[in-house]
Amino acid sequence: MDSDKPEIGPFIAKMVGPYTAAAIEKLKQGQPGDTITRHQMAIVVGLPCGTDERGYSHVLTAIKRTRKDHRVIWKWFRDLQSWKCLEDKDKEPAMRSDLRSARKRGKKALEIGTTVDRSKLSDDERRDHTLTMTQAGMTYACNGSPLRNKLIAAHANGKQLQQPDPQKLVDLMDGGQRPENGTQ
């Protein structure tokens, strides 16, 4: 097998198409610190992979699938002019960048939502609007610096921080009622 042209399994090629499948096969083999340029990826995919070119969307889809299915994380680095397979030290800044983007989207959703005249909505539309505004508000609040600073302070004071349980967040939104089984 040529190292630039990975062998594509028939199942994955049917599932996502041959261009994306070729990119997935190459990217899933990535080791932390590896880089691949647009030109190298174009050879693998068989299409030009510049931002406005046909192969670019296949590469982006492959990056998402590789992250989800193979736990290999790739990110574009402008200064390198290539995609880089992230090392653990690179993953934290990437996560924070994604959270900043989510906060901005939450803020935008809130700005749009506040322009809605709820009196002109049906009961179902009003309910949906309330739910969407709640989600937007939580997205905005949970991804910001004030909450992060509180978490940093709590950690500095010896508190053990854990990943939140989504059901507990829903329970908090429901008036802070504890679940029937008495757990927190």
Image (cartoon, rainbow, N blue to C red):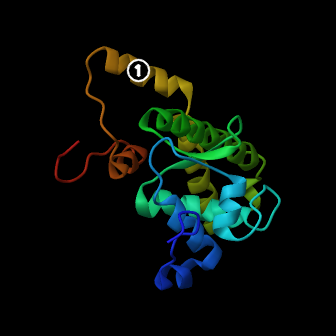
Q: Which residue is mark 1?
A: 152
Taking the view exactly as shown, the residue that stands out farthest to the right is 52
When the figure is inspected, residue 100 is found, relative to residue 58, above or below; the finding is: above
Residue 111: x %, y % from top left:
74, 42
Front-most of 93 and 100? 93
Residue 117: x %, y % from top left:
77, 53
- Residue at horizontal 25 percent and vertical 27 percent from the top: 160
Which element type, helix, strand or loop, lies under badge 1? helix
Front-most of 174 and 109? 109
Front-most of 69 and 127? 69
- Residue at horizontal 32 percent and vertical 47 percent from the top: 165
Q: How many marks?
A: 1
- Residue at horizontal 53 percent and vertical 42 percent from the top: 138
Residue 10: x %, y % from top left:
49, 85
Taking the view exactly as shown, the residue that stands out farthest to the top is 157
Mark 1 Cα within 10 Å, few/some/many (few <14, many 20+)? few
Residue 135: x %, y % from top left:
55, 50
Q: Is residue 101 at all visible to an observer of this figure?
A: yes
When the figure is inspected, residue 90 is found, relative to residue 166, above or below; the finding is: above
- Residue at horizontal 39 percent and vertical 16 percent from the top: 153
Taking the view exactly as shown, the residue that stands out farthest to the front is 2
- Left or right of residue 32, residue 15 in this image: right
When the figure is inspected, residue 1 is found, relative to residue 76, above or below; the finding is: below
Quadrant location, the C terminus: top left
When the figure is inspected, residue 177 is found, relative to residue 67, above or below; the finding is: above
Q: Is residue 105 at all visible to an observer of this figure?
A: no
Q: Amino acid at mark 1?
A: Ile
- Image quarter for residue 42? bottom right
